[in-house]
Amino acid sequence: MYKIQTLNNISPIIHEVLSADQYTVSAEEPTPDAILVRSAAMHDMVLPDSLLAVARAGAGVNNIPIQKCSEQGIVVFNTPGANANAVAELVIAGLLLSSRDIAGGIACVKENKDAEGLEKLMEKKKSQFVGPELRGKKLAVIGLGAIGALVANAAARGMGMNVVGYDPYISVQHAWQLSTSIHKADTMEEAVQDADYITFHIPLVDSTRGTINKAFINSLKKGVRIMNFSRGELAVPEDVKEAIEEGQLAGYVTDFACNLLADMPHVVCLPHLGASTPESEERCAEMAASEIKDYLEKGIIHNSVNLPEITLGVPEGTRILVIHKNVPGVVSNVSSLISGRGINIQNMLNKSRGDMAVSVLELTQQPDDTLVAALSKLNNVVRVRVL
């Protein structure tokens, strides 16, 4: 039986993937083989020695200590694309909210709900909330992954916008999904030049933190509107505030609450609603549970953020996974130790990602505990699993 700990309320659909005859799933599990998490902060958690994998039911993994997990040989998964449609729909709403002051208009009606002749009064006040149409305007989409591609296509095909996309790491799959009417820029500077609207769909890493800053905003066309549905830390709030006050930014919509911007005119701060649909939560949970199941039962690694992609078929013998540092000599030391015990290696696969690597070996016979212990003690070996 595999033991799974849940750190948040996860959709019950996980039980369709993690069957009761092979898995126990509990929020109180003290020695889990895997953890399923949504938004719970894990940085201060003590990660038990039993833990083999963490799966985030969502795309962002800021709440997970990636480096600590790698050092302990724990695979970290996320679910890219599972919430893409939910976020893309909210981005389209964000374009409308940034363009016409819909939120301000709603608030005005509520504030005057008891006024005599409310309808006529609102007719007089409605000029405060006017804004331009989207059709024919230029939209720059920065990041053309699952969400960015959906937004770009919807804006181009359904809303008549002139869409320019930029993504230096675009996958072949997402490139094929883009409408032929979308222009692909070679640089971000080219994409945002003279843009009326900009939407960001990029991960938060050291190189992207604070991208939406004073220098960037001042390089844009005056009156541009920016959507940030990626991560709040992509923006420098003080710079956004100043740009709004000076009129350089006509609007800013973000899915991340910010004290400095929360009550500003021409700013809409949403409470991280992007993936908050029942459909999205189910897709994320099902995908995360499937990643856990594949790894625990077969050693398959798919959608990991810290280890390489490992695609495996049905085992041809006893399968061993060795998670190790990506340095010379480890693979030869592992294979020498195994062959020195008179065990033949039928198949072997080695793949790396950054500082980490995974070697998968299929053996003609089951290794005993002393061999597994010896493999675990080799220099630069982090973890050994026998499936």
Image (tube, rainbow, N blue to C red):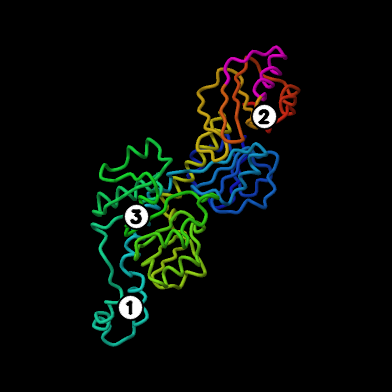
Q: Quadrant of residue 251?
A: bottom left
Q: Earlier in the sequence, mark 3 or mark 2?
A: 3
Q: CA distance from mark 3 to mark 2?
A: 51 Å
- Disc 1 versus disc 3: nearer the observer: 3
Label 1: few (<14), some (14–19) or many (≥20) C-alpha neighbours in 10 Å: some
Mark closest to the chain's N terminus, 1 or 3 = 1
The residue beneath circle 3 is 193
Helix, strand or loop at disc 3? loop
Image check: 114 left or right of 4? left
Q: Residues within 10 Å of mark 3 (few under 14, many from 20)?
A: some
Residue type at numbered disc 1: Val
Q: Where does label 2 land, which residue?
A: 384
* Disc 1: which residue: 109
Separation of residues labelled 2 and 1 (CA atoms): 64 Å
In-image side of 339 versus 245 (left or right): right
**Residue 369 location (% of width, % of height):** 74, 24
Task: Out of 99 and 193, give the one closest to the viewer.
Answer: 193
Where does residue 142 sit, x and y in percent of width and height?
40, 50
Residue 352 rendering spot, x and y as whole percentages: 57, 31
